[in-house]
Image (spheres, rainbow, N blue to C red):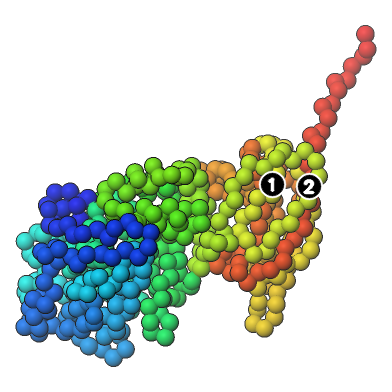
Amino acid sequence: MTTQHKQRTGWWGALLLLVTVAPPDPGVAVADEPARGAMVDVARLEATARRAGLRVVSGERLVLVTDRPARAGDGVEDLPRIFDEAFAAWCDHFRVDPKSVPSWRAFGCLMSDREAFRAAGLLPIDGTVPDFANGFCDRNRFWLVDQANPAYRRHLLLHEGVHAFTLTLRSLAAPTWYTEGIAELLATHRLEAGHFQPTPIPRRADEVEQLGRIEALRRLRTSGEIPGLADVFATPPSPRHDIPAYATSWATTALLAGHPSHAGRFQAIESGPLDARLTARLEASDGWDGDLAARDFDAFTDDLDHGYDFGRSAIEWTDGRPLTAPAELVVAADRGWQPSGWSMKADETAEFVATGRAGVGRAGAIDLESTADGISLRWYRGRPLGRLLVAQWAVPAEGSRPRFVVVAEGAAARFTAITTGALYLKLNAPPGELAGFDGGLDVALTPVAPPAPQQRGGEKR
């Protein structure tokens, strides 16, 4: 799922002709019609496809050609309509008035056998299109290999559609992480009553069959190979990307577009040129804190799951005051990691007692409640649902990226700080289900004084 644009140097870049960029206006941007010669002639290509006997299905914004035999219920006939609905969402994201580009159309080739398209003259054989694995886009023209799974076929089509949109209407020439990340973000969707609904972070695995971005990030975390934000920003151009590269690019744009600390700034950057200096402008923008963004990215990729809710999971990073006397706090059930307001030095010891009950969702018609020990009716990530967790932000013993390392859990425990830093607490729960939780637990924290040094025995002299 690669694109053809200026940042990819050499002969690829020479093929892209620039078009007018939507102005960075705080209101609705009105894009100019693409400049003459900037887009391929869709009508001519459609005529070529019909002469070759290929199947053609079309909508307002897409002409789709395929050699795939018509099969009842395969969803191919619906793809142009879904593309049209997605196009409206992309216009909304980039603040482009769709009425300003009435003639914009894309031409897509859904291929079971590439040779059929080569023979028809619809897949160049002169080297201008690289040997792609799943999809490739040149201006408003793209190719995708047919997929057995209808949901993944739609995603792939929309991913290439985002490339076509940004290449022609936004003169895309941005770093790889943005180019692929924004295509993944804006293509991720679910169908409701057969209609496109943007879902930047999938709510459930069965809504995005075969996509596997969240699962790929989990594997990277487990293996200790998850990159940091700076690593993703440095993703090199490539005609072929693997699943981890797509997953981390998607995670980066999802964080920047959805996290309350970064969304406004990211939107402002996107309203400007989408060129090779996009990352540099982001890092130089007013209020940008690279260390904070890197920490937010690490926390996001570690806690990420379907339905992740930035509003409830965004972390308030604090240093905290030294825990030198007993303290009391409340841990909300409907939030992710929450600062205790207190910090400890490495090897200091404390203890806590948690009381109360919190609502932790429903099982059918039954409201579920939990104490700090959690409920064994359901487990999440190896612990009972609703179990109180106490953690510090640290590099885990096995290495990899920093994360919240649990130092204690349950209704009562004595623990030792593993690093110098603040204490954070939460109830164990899938981040996508926090909206269904309510109430909280009362927690009493008490520092434990170190044992007094023993005097050496011996005779007095």
* Position of the C terminus by quadrant: top right
| Residue 314 can be seen in this image | yes
Q: Quadrant of the N terminus?
A: bottom left
**Residue 134 position in % (x across, y down):** 25, 66
Q: Quickly name the residue at label 1.
A: 341
Q: Which residue position holds label 2?
A: 327
Q: Residue 113, how many percent across, how many down?
A: 16, 75
Residue 319, by quadrant, is top right
Q: Residue furthest right?
A: 460
**As rendered, which of 1 and 96 lies closer to the eye?**
96
Asked whether, in this view, residue 115 is left or right of residue 390, the answer is: left
Q: Could one spot residue 242 in this view of the protein? A: no
Nearer-N-terminus badge (1/2): 2
CB of mark 1 within 8 Å of CB of mark 2?
Answer: yes
Residue in view at x 31 percent, y 53 percent:
272
Residue 19: image location, x then y, percent: 18, 60
In the rendered image, the vertical position of residue 166 relative to residue 416, given as above or below? below
In three-dimensional space, the C-alpha distance between marks 1 and 2, rounded to whole angstroms, equals: 9 Å
Give the amino acid at mark 2.
Ala
Q: Residue at x 68, y 36 (%)?
A: 345
| Residue 400, percent from left and from top | 48, 45
- Label for residue 379? none
Mark 1: amino acid? Gly
SS for dot 2: strand
Q: Nearer the viewer, residue 117 or 34?
A: 34
Q: Quadrant of residue 180?
A: bottom left
State the residue at coordinates (14%, 49%). Answer: 10
